[in-house]
Image (cartoon, rainbow, N blue to C red):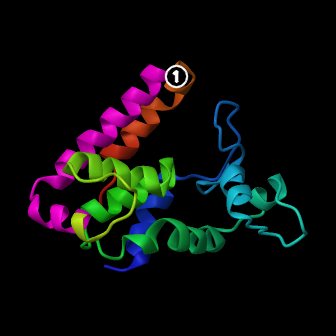
Amino acid sequence: MNFENYLKVILKHEGGLVNHPKDKGKITQYGVSLRFLQNEGIDVDGDGDIDAQDVIGLSVAQAGVIYKKYFFDHLHAVPDGLLKLHLFDMGVNAGSRKAVKLLQYTLGVEQDGVIGKNTLKAILADKGIVEKYIKARIAFYNDLVNRNSDYSCFLNGWLRRVRTTQF
């Protein structure tokens, strides 16, 4: 399966321009936040600063390039399929390292945020890993809201996102 198949699913979850006051990522377009652009030093409009205008002017194609480089390419060793899609989706929503660490926690291997040989070996050995990872994502979001009630406004959307992450 190619990147475009994965991207279509992510773009269903990531709408257009959003500027929710409780979103720590700040203004967001197609799931790419101002905070992310600033952290990575991505000046989308090339004007010498990274501000809301970079997010507002972001195209779907530019978002796709960002997704591929920062959220998808590091998953190359993961076999194509639903697990890879969930890792990609979780990475876009919560950060790639966090997505991989949650997988590693679920697998019972070292949580370094990198899919290396031990993580890959554990993935291949666990035939039920997709279902376990989906449950771990749900638990992650519930725990996040339990620790910070400010996020409760996002919970239903996050859970819907997990349930609808499929080809």
Secondary structure type for disc 1: loop
Residue at the image position 41 percent from the left and 61 percent from the top: 88
| Location of the C terminus (image quadrant) | bottom left
User: Is 144 part of what is drawn in magenta?
Assistant: yes
Q: Nearer the viewer, residue 120 or 152?
A: 120
Q: Is residue 154 left or right of residue 87?
A: right
Q: Tell me if residue 96 comes above or below residue 60 in the rendering.
A: above
User: Is 65 part of what is drawn in magenta?
Assistant: no
Percent position of residue 20, x then y: 67, 35
| Location of the N terminus (image quadrant) | bottom left
Residue at the image position 65 percent from the left and 44 percent from the top: 25
Q: Quadrant of residue 141?
A: top left
Q: Amino acid at mark 1?
A: Asn
Percent position of residue 24, x then y: 65, 38
Q: Tell me if residue 50 comes above or below residue 121 in the rendering.
A: above
Majority secondary structure of magenta residues: helix
Magenta span: 119-147
Q: Is residue 124 left or right of residue 92?
A: left
Q: Nearer the viewer, residue 56 or 110?
A: 110
Residue at the image position 34 percent from the left and 62 percent from the top: 85
Q: Tell me if residue 137 comes above or below residue 165 in the rendering.
A: above
Residue at the image position 38 percent from the left and 27 percent from the top: 143
Label 1: how many Cα within 10 Å (few below 14, some 14–19, many 20+): few
Disc 1 target residue? 148
Q: Is residue 63 left or right of residue 1?
A: right
Residue projecting furthest to the right: 47
Residue projecting furthest to the bottom: 2
Q: Tell me if residue 1 comes above or below residue 95 in the rendering.
A: below
Percent position of residue 92, x then y: 50, 55
Percent position of residue 47, x then y: 90, 69
Q: Nearer the viewer, residue 86 or 77?
A: 77
